[in-house]
Structures are given as C-alpha cells and as structure tokens.
Amino acid sequence: MDRPDFDPVLLDPTRLSIVSLLVGTEWAEFGWVREAAGLSASALSKQVTTLGSHGYVEVEKGYVGKRPRTWLNLTATGREALERQVTALQHIVDGSRTEGQEARVQSPRPGGRGKRTTHGT
C-alpha cells in the first residue's frame, strides 16, 4: 500500500477536530468551538495560533454590545488541507479493506479449515 501524504499540522487530533468543526460554518464563535471541541480557552487559543500560522484559520475580534468576542473561520487553504487529510485517511481505510480481503483469501483461519475445536474438553 502506498503511503498517504499526511499533513503534519492535522495529524494532531485536536487540530483536526477544530478544522472539522469549522468546515461546516462560515464564522464560528470561539466559545462555541471551545465547547464543541471540549477544550479550555487557553488550549483552543494555542491550537488556533498554530492553525493560523499555517494559514488554515483566520481570527476576527470584535464586540457584541460591550462584550468582546472572537470568531474563527476556516480559510480556503484550511479547507484544502482538510480535504487532503480526509483523502489520505480514506486511502488507508480503502487499502486496509483490500489487503484484509487478500489476507483472508491467502491464509486459512487459525486451527485449520474444519470445525473449531477446544482443548481440554
């Protein structure tokens, strides 16, 4: 099986979760992403900084009334990276199915082909 081309940034499950949440939105409020991803504010902030430095997420700050708010958006680059990552993961799944079928055809199950036996009875 060929080795898929993984994005090292999205190998981290937390970052993969964040971009997966953002793919279905246009702009998501920071608090919603924090709760949906099950992260603390500082942990999400750190991951957003990493994603932002790679151009995957953009951040917009503003106010709702007098309350400060932060919104996150998945960029076109981030969407493309997620699509490539999903394709790479799907490649592994598809390859394991093919290789698993070949293994079943080539090797009989342990204990031979006949009736399953138990020892000591």
Image (cartoon, rainbow, N blue to C red):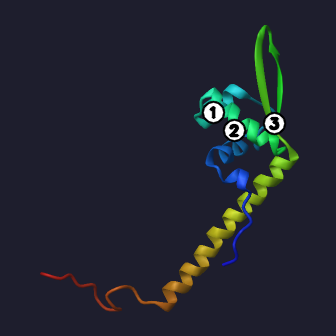
Vertically, is 77 above or below 113? above
The image shows residue 2 at horizontal and vertical percentages of 70, 76
Up-down: is 87 above or below 43? below
Q: CA distance from mark 2 to mark 1?
A: 6 Å
Q: CA distance from mark 3 to mark 2?
A: 14 Å
Give the residue drawn at x 62%, y 68%: 93
Which corner quadrant of the image does residue 112 belong to? bottom left
| Label 3 with label 2: CB-CB less than 8 Å | no
Is residue 93 or residue 4 the one in the foreground? 4
Tag count in the figure? Answer: 3
Q: Nearer the viewer, residue 23 or 13?
A: 13
Residue at the outermost right position: 76
Q: Is residue 32 visible?
A: yes
Q: Which sits earlier in the primary sequence, circle 3 or circle 1?
A: 1
Residue 102: image location, x then y, percent: 56, 86
Residue type pointed to by label 2: Gln
Compared across the picture, whether 71 is left or right of 91 comes to right
Estimate how packed mark 1 is, as few (under 14), some (14 to 19) or many (20 or more) residues with alpha carbons within 10 Å: few
Mark 3 or mark 1: which is in front?
1
Task: Give the number of the disc on residue 7.
Answer: none
Q: Are marks 2 and 1 in contact (CB under 8 Å)?
A: yes
Q: Which residue is mark 3?
A: 73
Picture residue at 76% right of the left edge, 44% below the top: 23
Q: Residue at x 62, y 34 (%)?
A: 36
- Helix, strand or loop at disc 2? helix
Q: Which residue is mark 2?
A: 47
Outermost residue on the top side: it is 66
Within 10 Å of disc 2 (Cα), the crowding (few <14, some 14-19, many 20+) is: some
Circle nearer the viewer, 3 or 2: 2
In this figure, which residue is indicated by the disc labeled 1?
Answer: 43
| Amino acid under disc 1 | Ala
Q: Residue at the location (76% across, 19% down)?
A: 69
